[in-house]
Image (cartoon, helix red, strand yellow):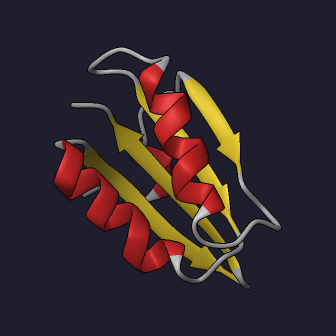
């Protein structure tokens, strides 16, 4: 996992799930990932604290790499490389 946002790869797509609560962020991620190819990078922005548990499990279960995870003042940012 990358330690700093400065060293993140460019993203191929961005998904803003701010204001949505479980299970909606994961459902939207699953739909977005279907339209992407392995190796592409997805950035996800969320406000639901449950995503700190759900997104890493989603990545692990489906074989994606969670490159970056950061929380700042109730907003969560994830960068995922599709497997």
Left or right of residue 59, residue 35 in this image:
right
Q: Is residue 33 left or right of residue 23?
A: left
Tell which of 75 and 15 is nearer to you. Answer: 15
* Residue 24: percent from left, percent from top: 64, 59
Answer yes or no: is residue 3 visible.
no
Relative to the observer, which residue lies in front, 82 or 8?
82
Q: Work out whether residue 51 or residue 72 is closer to the camera in this orientation and state it.
A: 51
Above-or-below relation of 54 to 34:
below
Viewport quadrant of the N terminus: bottom left
Q: Quadrant of residue 58?
A: bottom left
Residue at figure coordinates x 32%, y 65% from the top left: 56
Q: Quadrant of the C terminus?
A: top left
Relative image position of residue 70 (x, y in whole percent): 51, 70
| Snapshot quadrant of residue 46 | bottom right
Residue 75, can we see it? yes
Residue 26 position within the rendered picture, expressed as x and y whole percent measured from the top left: 52, 55
In this rendering, is residue 17 above or below 74? above
């Amino acid at each position: 996992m990358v330690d700093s946002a400065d060293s993140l790869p460019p993203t191929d797509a961005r998904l803003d799930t701010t204001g949505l609560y479980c299970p909606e962020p994961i459902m939207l991620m699953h739909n977005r990932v279907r339209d992407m190819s392995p190796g592409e990078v997805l950035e996800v922005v969320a406000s639901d604290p449950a995503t700190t548990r759900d997104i890493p499990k989603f990545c692990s279960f489906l074989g994606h790499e969670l490159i970056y995870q950061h929380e700042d003042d109730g907003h969560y940012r994830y960068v995922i490389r599709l497997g």
